[in-house]
Image: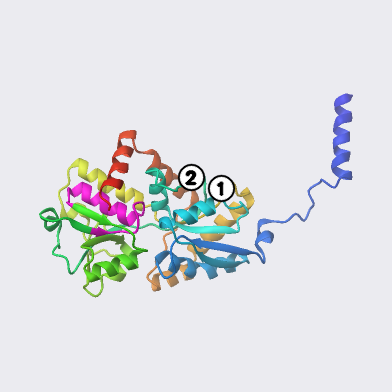
Amino acid sequence: MIFRGLVRALCALFILGGLAVPAGAETAADFYTGKVVRLVVGYGAGGGYDTYARMLAPHLEKRLGAKVVVENRPGGGGIVALNQVSAAKPDGLTIMLVSASSSTFSQLIEAEGVRYDVRRLGILGRVIDEKRAFAWSAAAPYRTVEDAQNSAKPIRFGGTSRTDTLGATSAFLAEALALNAQIIVGYKGTKEVSLAAVRGEIDGFALSDSSARKYGKDGSILPFVIISRERSRIVPDIPTIFEVAELSPAQAWWMDYCDALLGLGRALVTAPDLPADRLTYLQAAVKDVLTDRAVVAEAEAKKRPLNYASPEKTREQIAAVIGSLTPEEIARVRHVAQEKFR
C-alpha cells in the first residue's frame, strides 16, 4: 500500500509540476539551427589546416543550418588551442580541426603545457590520413640516405616544435639512420619551413605527402622518400624508406611507429562530455560532408584530398598508438623527442 501511494504521488508531481517530457522536445537539429559554431584551427592563417578548415566550413554550415566561423588560435604547435577546446563548454558549438598525430604524440611524451586527453575528446571523424615525406633543400649537398649517413657535419633539419610531427619525423628518421642531425624548431608551419629550405637555412625537413606534391614542383625542394612501407597515393613516384635503405629490425621499428602515428592524420573533434544526441548529430554531419562526392571532388581539385574514417576507427587508432608501447619504448620515444632538438 505504501509503495502504491508513493508511485501515485510521484506521478502527480510530474504532471502537476510540468516535468513530463513535451512531445515537441528540441532535437539536435533544432538546437543548431541559427547558432554560431566556431571551427578552431591551432595554427595561423594560410597554412594547410587553415585551408582545410575554410574549405569545409561552408559545407558544414549548410549541413548543420548554423553559421560556421573559422578561428585561428596559433600557439604551442596546436596545444594551446586544443587545451581551450578540451576545456570548453560541452555544448557542441566549438569544434576543432586537429593534427591527431601531433596531439597524440604531445600527450604521449608528456609535452609541456598539455592539459587535454585525446582519448576523452568527442571524435567527429578523420578528415585525411597522411604519409610523411622527407625532402632535401636543393641548396644542400645531400640527395640520398647514403649522402646523409656519410655527412661529416651535422645535418640541419627544420620543424615547428618539439611536439609537432614535422620535428618528430625528423627525430625518428635521424635515430633510425644514425644521422648526425640537429633539428631547428620555431618555424610557424610547413610554409615557413619550406622557405627556410629554399633559402638554405636548413638542409631538409619532413612534410605531408600532400605538401610534398605542392612544394616539390619547382626544383628548389626535393622530396626523396616516404616514411612508410607503402608508397603514397598522392605522390606515388616517391619511393619508401624501405625501398631506399636496408633497415635492421630496430631501425624499422622507428619507421613503422612513425607511420602509425602519422596515419592518425587530421581529425575534427569537440569537447569531452557532449550530450549524446548532439555528438551523434555532429558525427553524422561530418560524415555527410566528408563523403559527399561534390565535396571530395572540390577538395581534390584544390590539392587538399579527403579520406574519411569513422569516429570509432579514429578512436581505436589513437588508443593503439598510445597503448601499444611498452614502458621502455615510451622512454625511448621521449628521449629521442628531446635530444635532437636545439
Residue 266 seen anywhere in this rendered image of the structure: no
Q: With 314 as the anchor, is 253 left or right in this view? A: left
Q: Quadrant of residue 62?
A: bottom right
| Magenta residue span | 157-180
Q: Residue furthest bottom?
A: 218
Q: CA distance from mark 1 to mark 2?
A: 9 Å
Q: Would residue 49 be visible to someone looking at this image? A: yes
Using the image, determine if residue 102 lies above or below residue 195: above
Residue 8 location, x and y as percent? 88, 34
Residue that numbered label 1 is attached to: 272
Whether tag 1 and tag 2 are in contact, CB under 8 A, the answer is yes
Q: Which of the two residues, 185 or 91, is positioned nearer the viewer here?
A: 185
Q: Amino acid at mark 2?
A: Asp
Asked whether, in this view, residue 312 is left or right of residue 156, the answer is right
322 on left or right of 17 = left
Q: Secondary structure at mark 1?
A: loop
Q: Residues within 10 Å of mark 1 (few under 14, many from 20)?
A: many
Does the magenta run of residues contain 178? yes
Residue 151 drawn at (x, y percent):
11, 56
Above or below residue 15? Residue 289 is: below
Q: Secondary structure at mark 2?
A: loop
Q: x, y percentage for residue 266? A: 42, 57
Quadrant of the drawing holding the N terminus? top right
Q: What is the number of the mark on residue 117?
A: 2
